[in-house]
């Protein structure tokens, strides 16, 4: 089944949200449950993917997964459990890509739950690069690659094989730097992370 938000017969691009982090530097508060605009941060991140044009949306959970399921409104999302989340973001990326196998989507647009400064405008711009025929694309901020990152399905197996520790897809993206369509998003988004107590000031 495909769920395209393009309105025509364009293939769907799945939103893949990595939301398993335990917030080690935040006193062990799971990032998915940090409050933002009165609701858990994971809800905001899902809404960004949908508003930007992704469908379906797969959410990888790890730290406090049961609590996230109970407290966050994630209706319509495919929730993917990553029991190895403590071993780093690479395990979440692998779990998420595995969950997309056989779904019929042609690409995955990957975002991180702890980057609330990246909104639907950046998602839409990266999706536009895919519609223009690019199978590797990423948002850039003043020319520096960031998130979201889009991988065509042909790349998934090799991305998963190279995803280790907290590196995620970095090694793969370095090897294929010349093939990546960089889409400048610095005018519509901010690529900060919520990693420390000081970063919580970015949340509302």
Image (cartoon, rainbow, N blue to C red):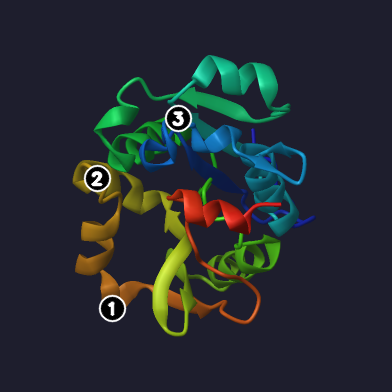
> Looking at the image, is mark 1 or mark 3 earlier in the sequence?
3
| Mark 1, secondary structure of its residue | helix
Above or below: residue 78 compared with residue 7: above
The residue labelled by disc 3 is 99
Dot placed on the residue nearer the N-terminal end, 2 or 3 = 3
Q: What is the spatial separation of the Cα atoms under label 1 and label 2, in whole angstroms?
A: 19 Å
Residue under label 2: 163
Identify the secondary structure beneath mark 3.
helix
> Do callouts 1 and 2 mark residues in contact (Cβ within 8 Å)?
no
Q: How many other residues sit within 10 Å of disc 2, few (<14), some (14-19) or many (≥20)?
A: many
Disc 1 crowd rating (10 Å Cα; few below 14, some 14-19, many 20+) is few
Q: Is residue 108 left or right of residue 124?
A: left
Q: Nearer the viewer, residue 110 or 86?
A: 86
Front disc: 2 or 3: 2
User: Which residue in the structure is indicated by mark 1?
Assistant: 178
In depth, the one of 130 and 200 nearer the eye is: 200
């Amino acid at each position: 089944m495909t769920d395209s938000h393009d309105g025509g017969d364009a293939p769907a691009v799945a939103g893949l949200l990595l939301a398993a982090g335990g917030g080690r530097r935040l006193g062990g508060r799971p990032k998915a449950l940090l409050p933002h605009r009165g609701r858990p941060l994971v809800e905001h991140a899902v809404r960004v993917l949908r508003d930007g044009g992704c469908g379906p949306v797969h959410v990888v959970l790890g730290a406090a997964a049961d609590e996230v399921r109970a407290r966050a409104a994630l209706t319509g999302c495919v929730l993917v459990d990553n029991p190895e989340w403590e071993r780093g973001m690479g395990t979440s990326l692998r779990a998420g890509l595995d969950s997309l196998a056989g779904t019929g989507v042609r690409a995955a647009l990957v975002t991180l739950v702890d980057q609330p400064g990246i909104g639907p405008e950046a998602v839409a711009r990266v999706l536009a690069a895919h519609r223009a025929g690019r199978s590797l694309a990423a948002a850039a901020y003043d020319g520096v690659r960031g998130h979201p990152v889009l991988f065509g399905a042909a790349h998934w197996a090799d991305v998963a094989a190279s995803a280790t520790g907290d590196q995620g897809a970095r090694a793969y993206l370095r090897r294929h730097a010349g093939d990546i369509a960089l889409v400048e998003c610095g005018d519509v988004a901010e690529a900060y992370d919520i990693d420390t107590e000081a970063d919580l000031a970015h949340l509302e």
